[in-house]
Amino acid sequence: MSTTYNPKVIEPKWQKIWMDEKAFAATTDYTKPKYYALVEFPYPSGQGLHVGHPRPYTALDIVARKRRMQGYNVLYPMGWDAFGLPTENYAIKNKIHPRVVTKNNVARFKQQLQSLGYSFDWDREINTTDPEYYHWTQWIFLKLFNAGLAYKTEMPINWCTSCKVGLANEEVVNGVCERCGSPVVRRVKSQWMLKITEYADKLIDDLDTVDYIERVKVSQKNWIGRSEGAEVDFQIKGKKETLRIYTTRPDTLFGVTYMVLSPEHPYLDQFKDEITNMDEVLAYREEAAKKSDFERSELAKEKTGVEIKGLSAVNPVNGQEIPIWISDYVLMSYGTGAIMAVPAHDGRDWEFAKKFGLPIVEVVAGGEDVQKEVFEAKTGTMVNSDFLNGMDFDTAKKTMIKWLEEKGIGHAKKNFKLRDWVFSRQRYWGEPIPIVECEKCGFVPLSEKDLPLELPEVESYMPTDTGESPLAAMTDWVNTTCPCCGGPAKRETDTMPQWAGSSWYFLRYTDPHNKEALASKEALKYWLPVDWYNGGMEHTTLHLLYSRFWHKFLYDQGIVPTPEPYQKRTSHGMILGSNGEKMSKSRGNVVNPDDVVNEFGADTLRTYEMFIGAFELAASWSEDGVKGCRRFLERVWKLQDMLTEEEGYSKNLEVRMHQTIKKVTGDFETLKYNTAIAAMMSLINDFYKAGKVTKGEMKTFLSLLNPVAPHITEELWQIAGFEGRIYNTQWPAFDEAKTVDSTIKLVVQVNGKTRAVIDAPADVDKDMAIAMGREAAAAKIKGDVIKEIYVPGKLVNFVVK
RNA sequence: GCGGAUGUGGCGGAAUGGUAGACGCAGCAGACUCAAAAUCUGCCGGUGGCGACAUCGUGAGGGUUCGAGUCCCUCCAUCCGCACCA
């Protein structure tokens, strides 16, 4: 009789054995086929691990373990994305150095992850706050700077009033700070910027070369927001200056009835002497300036604006004089800050024209009356448009662009919603930016040999209301000499944002202890690209986009061998509380993974999180569900009492065995962990019905389950006296021919309704099936059979009139 | 407004256009037990019928098909992004 299943004993036992045997170390034998599986490294927060973490980690642990059993050299690493605000805030509040806070949090996280039995290669653990690591973060920054992709500029930034720090656009959500929820205001500050816009085209186009789930591709494309149109110069009447606008609809130029400038457009000042209602215009501009961008769009249900009197424009296609307005529905930050308005074919222009009684001229036929309803579709035929008349959208657009280019008054132009990346943070706990400002030489990069530029010890990490980083108070550190001329210079006191360290961490894992380079050429060539990267949807337009950008830059610099970092990207759904709401302390629905491991064991937690539902969808926690998985593992445990001496599979279970291997093998690849586990539950029910399990069945079953529940399967493998360790046995093979039963269930339908299910030989032919079906459903076939449908091996359907 | 997703028993969820509800949870019954728990076995969408069975049933309404949860059209609801991007 078996002992009790006791995960508290067997789980630590096997974790220690794996560690001692270096079971999951990726080797440097670059002749073996490789597999690089990656999950997003966590931010080691003070709260410790959340039950959300194990979902993706277990999913790719399954893939990694399976790949090892299939003979691959697998890299499945883990590390810490440890710079960041919460640590700094905690340090300020409790007067503990952020380094110490980080060290403690990392220790806790690591212990928690290890208690879950992940097959991470801990020899390759990295930490973004380690100077040996950020040495190379800074090195990449220097490369970016030297390539002209990092620049400092005065610009209005999103300033979080509580964190006292500048935020990237991506970090502002609904006008408040993504992290703390405090209001975000505009502040003009000199900021380091990275020219991610330089890579906008490639970041979109190369999505076609990678295997990302569709919604990730779609959101990246939308975020980058490429649009293709034209810039057109409109003459200002009676002046030599022209007004440049951007439009995606140059085909509708004949329908322009007015122009609109953004309230911040420089022409307002430039032509202030000509504008006869300047008071009104300035008042409007002031009103607009008061609103934040957020309010401006939020409150913009009703269009507002003021006509600029004394100034007008000339439509280059027909010489018509048209009025110029200002309105805050035109943004200075996009295109040229000025638009041509075509109210007949643009919803916003239409609303504006209706409100202010401006003319609406139809130039694309195909809609309803444009005086009553806007027609925006890119279908229909051009009318009222001189040389464009009769053309469709595409032809008209091309023809017009060509015409504009020939006349020298316009040209094709692409625009993006994507903005450059604000790369400065006025904070202590981040990577120092390795730049000094010299009175004579301007911004001078440190030389590579002076890296890493270590974060100095400061007395206070308190951010300041002036917007200076706490580093600014460290005059000894700030005052330095210029690497270029040797004269007096000041160090940059802003630090990098949290996204810096995570933009390249997957490269470091390939060669984490290299002191000469961020990683060796050989390691990069062998391991890249990452074969499978799983992470949260919330990182789609932040981390994922940033890291693709850095990688593409490094590729152009000849540092990495692939144009894309990740071959495949998937995303997991959130784990919600048992009430279906997001877990949070205030809702009181938080589940601590440590408690689950304590009460049920790591294998149960792993199994449950994989069984909980479709991997990509959110799922609610259920204590009863956890118990069910524990019960399943108890049944697995007791298989040892049913084990016979027979090798191979029992005759009656042979097909089931092959079917299950096929199902599990396939489902582990397609994120369908829940159905894979269901198949294994079914199989174990069959063993119980049979009252026994053969050695062959046991070996296969344990091997299939091992990636999900590694401890119990390893223990049972040992108890059964099977050779070696299960982690390095071979993944079970199936024989396609043996996945098919010798008899089939033949469905007999009459008019599409199932009337009988009969056993038939698997190789039943059409005539035989029809004959059998007729007999089985004879009572239901009332009338003439006008048609017989036969689906081989599946069903017969009699169509009766 | 635009984009993406989701909608199936009491619950979580399964179903290459071919028996809807696999697997699990909860529930019910039986076995074991002095008893309970645990475990094992069986039942488990609604309605009607003792029953074989009949009939309805995958958010709503149409359509295609011998056959639709699945494909097409029109809606509705919920969730998540983006949001005056010209």
Image: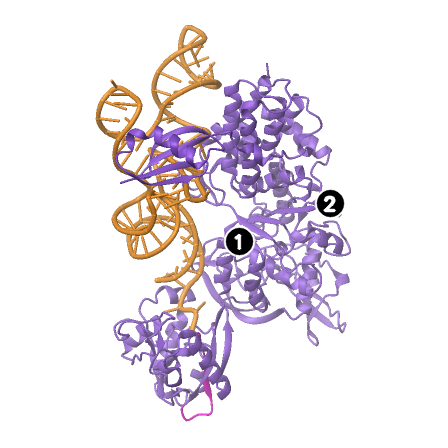
Chain colours: A purple, B orange
Q: Could you tell me the amino acid type at mark 2?
A: Lys
Q: Is residue A227 above or below residue A496?
A: below
Report helix, strand or loop for mark 1: helix
**A520 with respect to A332 (left or right):** right
Q: Is residue A722 visible?
A: yes
Q: Please name whichever residue, A412 or A13, is drawn nearer the observer in this view of the structure.
A: A412
The subunit letter for the residue under badge 1 reads: A
Q: Could you tell me the amino acid type at mark 1?
A: His
Q: Which residue is mark 2?
A: A32
Q: Horizontal and vertical percent for residue A717?
A: 65, 25
Work out whether disc 2 and disc 1 sit on a shared chain.
yes
Label 1 environment density (alpha carbons within 10 Å; few <14, some 14–19, many ≥20)? some
Tell us which disc is closer to us: 2 or 1.
2
Q: Which residue is mark 1?
A: A539
Report helix, strand or loop for mark 2: loop
Specify the quadrant that holds the N terminus of chain A: top right
Residue at coordinates 71% horizontally, 26% vertically from top-left?
A723
Cα distance, mark 2 to mark 1? 32 Å
Judge whether residue A240 is colored magenta.
Answer: yes
Label 2 environment density (alpha carbons within 10 Å; few <14, some 14–19, many ≥20)? few
- Report the span colored magenta: A237-248
The subunit letter for the residue under badge 2 reads: A
Q: Please name whichever residue, A629 or A86, is drawn nearer the observer in this view of the structure.
A: A629
Labels 2 and 1: the sequence-earlier one: 2
Q: Is residue A503 above or below residue A100?
A: below
Q: Is residue A309 visible?
A: no
